[in-house]
Image (cartoon, rainbow, N blue to C red):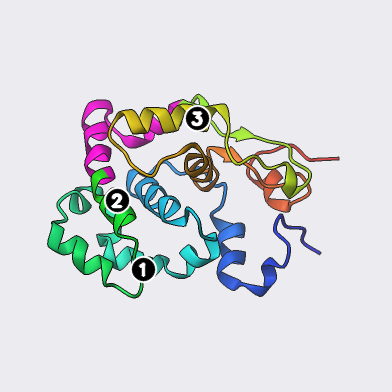
Amino acid sequence: MIRRCWPAIDADPAMLAYHDREWGVPVHDDRKLNEFMVLDAFQAGLSWAIVLKKREAFRDAFDNFEPDRMARFTPARIQRLVKNPGIIRNRLKIAASVTNARAFLDIQEEVGSFDAFIWQFVGGRTRHNRWKTLQQLPARSRESDRMSEALYGRGFKFVGSTICYAFMQAAGMVNDHLVGCYRHAELGGSRGR
């Protein structure tokens, strides 16, 4: 029997696929990093399962999370997104995604890639944690605090430390699979006892 982190995950095929193929896998593609940045901001106050079910609609609505295209969204486009029933229709989060895309592009221009900028907060390599229970998983860390502060300082919105930590988990900056989960070792963590 395969052991996984999340209880009752087998009941939700989308969550099962996300856990087994995406969560905690290191991401270095700027477009994909922008996708996680946007989706994690929309997750605030909601469950990841809700966001995941709407991910394809978000991809369509946000031009596949291409930051250069998102940065050009007009107020009229934002208004259309607010009316889109396929996505989470939070005006502040939608507007923040556009603002963030512009700041994302500024970082790319200055540093060369968002990847180089964002991975600095973990020294360029995945931090492999050794949690044994879900209750041990933190909601934030010193690294996510620093990331949040740096992103806010560059004009980002909806990038509090908890959102940044969720982003770090999604982008594989931290391996928060439980040590008893088969994915922990597959992603480079040592076997738990």
Residue 85, x across and y down, in percent: 33, 75
Residue 140, x across and y down, in percent: 57, 37
Q: Which mark is residue 97?
A: 2
The quadrant in which residue 137 appears is top right
* Alpha carbon separation for disc pair 3 and 2: 20 Å
Which amino acid type corresponds to the residue marked 3 in the rendered image? Asp
Secondary element at image label 1: loop
Left or right of 40 in this view: 82: left
Which amino acid type corresponds to the residue marked 1 in the rendered image? Ile
- Magenta region, mostly helix, strand or loop? helix
* Alpha carbon separation for disc pair 2 and 1: 13 Å
Residue 12 in the image: above or below residue 33: below
**Are the residues flagged by discs 3 and 2 in contact, CB closer than 8 Å?**
no
Residue 143 in the image: above or below residue 190: above
Residue 114, x across and y down, in percent: 33, 36
Left or right of 132 in this view: 176: left
